[in-house]
Every structure is written in C-alpha cells, then in structure tokens.
C-alpha cells in the first residue's frame, strides 16, 4: 500500500488525521451500521450487494444515507486507488451523527459517513489451507441480527471465549440448541446427502452477501443447497463444515468443540467453493 487515506463526511484525509467527535452517536450508543467489502486484484468484490445491504440496514434503523449508492461506490473505488490496495477490505461506517448525549435523536441531525481500507491476505490464507477450529458459544445478541449494526460486543466476547478455549473462532448457538451463525461469518455444513445447508435468512442472522453468492455458485455447479437450521451435533456429524464472509471468502471448519468434522481436514466442497468464488470474483462474475 501507498499512503493510507480516509474519507470522512465529504473530505479526503490522511488516515492518521481522521477524527470523529466524542459526541458521535456511534461512539456513545453504537447507533450506527457498517459494511465490509473485499478487494481483490485492486477491485471491489460483490460491491453492489454490500451497498444494497447497507441501504437496508440504514433504512431499518432510520439513518438516512448522506449520498446515493453510486456516489458511495465511487468513493470506495477512489479509496482503493489512492491507497494502492491490491488485496484487503474497504470498511464503511454510517452513524446517526453527533449531538449532546441523549437517547432521543434531535431533529435534523446529519449522519456521518466514514470509509477506510485495510490490507489483508485473503487468497494465500493459512487458515484456508489447514482449516479452522470452532468453539460453540451461547448467542447473546439482540433480536435484530439482520441489521449490520456496530453493536458487536457479544461477538467480541464470543471470539474471546473461543480463543480461551483454544479455538480459532466461535459459532453461536440459540436457546433451542441450533446454530445461528459464526461470530462474524455465515455457518454452513454439508450433510450426509452432499447438500450445502445454512440457516434461512430472518431477524436472527445477518443475510450474508458472500453466502448468497456461494449459494448461486454451488447451485450452478450442481451442488444442492438447502436453507434450514441445524444443531451442534448435526454440524459435528456433517460431511463438511465451513464459514463464509466478505473478508475471508470461505474457510473450512475441521473441528467443532474438539470433535473432528469427518476426517478433521478441509473438505472437497469447501475447497471447491472457495476456488469457485475466487475465480468468479477475478472474472467479474460477481456484482461490483
């Protein structure tokens, strides 16, 4: 990367100089939504889907977009070019704005929009080659997980608990014993029939953009796809397990709570879907 930039409320700033007020409601109340879009070979991956989800999240909490989606996409592209980013992510955060601390929102408050990039190794990921280990953790989040809110404390605690248990990441488990999703990714399994299974969209999970693209790619490659909830025991007994996200694409899961998934090695469908997603991104087959 060259010099690192940030875009904040209409201004291009050196990254180290970007500041938000201490009265910003994102800081005081987590009154904000966000998006993360991958960058591969200097191009945004599936950018249109992420911006559509941003608009949905903002609409669900009543934060107006300060710019239309094409204008935001143009900022993302310029940011990637300014930073000389070949591989990594663009982070975007939209807060309700800054005002004296009060639970009630003052009339006419102007929203605040921030964007910056992070360099990240996605393709040559050691985790993708070896697979990752998972610890299950109770899902303690609020009820509107379909909104991509910056209120991520429960996810932070889940990941910390997984680390303390010697695992790479956490899968969250609802009170009924079924997995909702990973702490910051979509959870998927391949059942005994070879069907790719993931929980249906709803208020209890985030509608994953990468998950949606993988579903299309899997179906095109003749892999059956089903949306249904599954238990921890089902995941441990699955033919394969994996998780998907914008910042990692597809990561095979090799153990869950210390129990090996199949032979405890990355499975062929996870590897195939990861390769297919990367090829589709590089070929411009995903929305951008």
Image: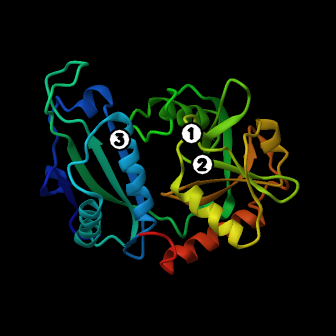
Give the residue pinned by disc 3: 59
Q: Are marks 1 and 2 in contact (CB under 8 Å)?
A: yes
Give the residue pinned by disc 1: 205
Image quadrant assignment for residue 33: top left
The residue lying at 44 percent from left, 67 percent from top is 45
The residue lying at 56 percent from left, 39 percent from top is 205
- In percent of width and height, residue 190 lies at 78, 55
Secondary structure at badge 3 equals: helix
Dot in front, 2 or 3: 3
Image quadrant assignment for residue 20: top left
Secondary structure at badge 1 equals: loop
Give how far apart the Cα atoms at labels 3 and 1 are: 17 Å
Mark 2 and mark 3 lie on one chain; the one further toward the N terminus is 3
Give the residue pinned by disc 2: 186
Q: Quadrant of the N terminus?
A: bottom left
The residue lying at 61 percent from left, 60 percent from top is 250
Number of on-image labels: 3
Q: Is residue 62 left or right of residue 152?
A: left
Q: Which mark is residue 248?
A: none
Q: Where 72 sits versus 35, above or below?
A: below
Q: Are marks 3 and 1 in contact (CB under 8 Å)?
A: no
Q: Is residue 288 left or right of residue 168?
A: left
Image quadrant assignment for residue 249: bottom right
Mark 1 and mark 2 lie on one chain; the one further toward the N terminus is 2
Q: Where 183 sits versus 50, above or below?
A: above
Give how far apart the Cα atoms at labels 1 and 2 are: 8 Å
């Amino acid at each position: 990367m060259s010099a690192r930039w940030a875009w904040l409320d209409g201004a291009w700033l050196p990254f180290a100089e970007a500041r938000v007020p201490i009265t910003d409601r994102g800081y005081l109340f987590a009154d904000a939504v966000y998006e993360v879009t991958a960058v591969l070979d200097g191009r945004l991956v599936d950018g249109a889907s992420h911006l559509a989800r941003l608009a949905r999240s903002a609409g669900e909490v009543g934060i107006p977009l300060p710019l239309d989606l094409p204008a935001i996409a143009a900022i993302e592209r310029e940011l990637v070019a300014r930073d000389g980013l070949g591989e990594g992510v663009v982070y975007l955060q939209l807060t309700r704005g800054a005002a004296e601390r009060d639970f009630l929102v003052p009339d006419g408050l102007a929203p605040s929009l921030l964007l910056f990039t992070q360099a990240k190794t996605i393709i040559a990921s050691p985790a993708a080659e070896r697979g990752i280990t998972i610890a299950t953790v109770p899902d303690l989040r609020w009820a509107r997980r379909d909104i991509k809110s910056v209120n991520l404390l429960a996810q932070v605690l889940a990941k910390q608990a997984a680390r303390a248990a010697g695992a790479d990441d956490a899968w969250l488990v609802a009170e009924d014993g079924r997995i909702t999703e990973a702490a910051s990714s979509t959870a998927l399994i391949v059942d005994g029939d070879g069907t790719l299974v993931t929980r249906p969209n709803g208020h209890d999970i985030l509608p994953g953009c990468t998950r949606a693209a993988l579903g299309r790619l899997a179906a095109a490659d003749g892999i059956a796809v089903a949306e249904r909830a599954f238990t921890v025991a089902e995941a441990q007994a699955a033919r394969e397990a994996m998780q998907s996200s914008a910042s990692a694409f597809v990561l095979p899961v090799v153990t869950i709570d210390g129990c090996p998934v199949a032979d405890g090695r990355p499975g062929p469908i996870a590897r195939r879907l990861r390769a297919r997603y990367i090829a589709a991104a590089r070929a411009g087959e995903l929305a951008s």
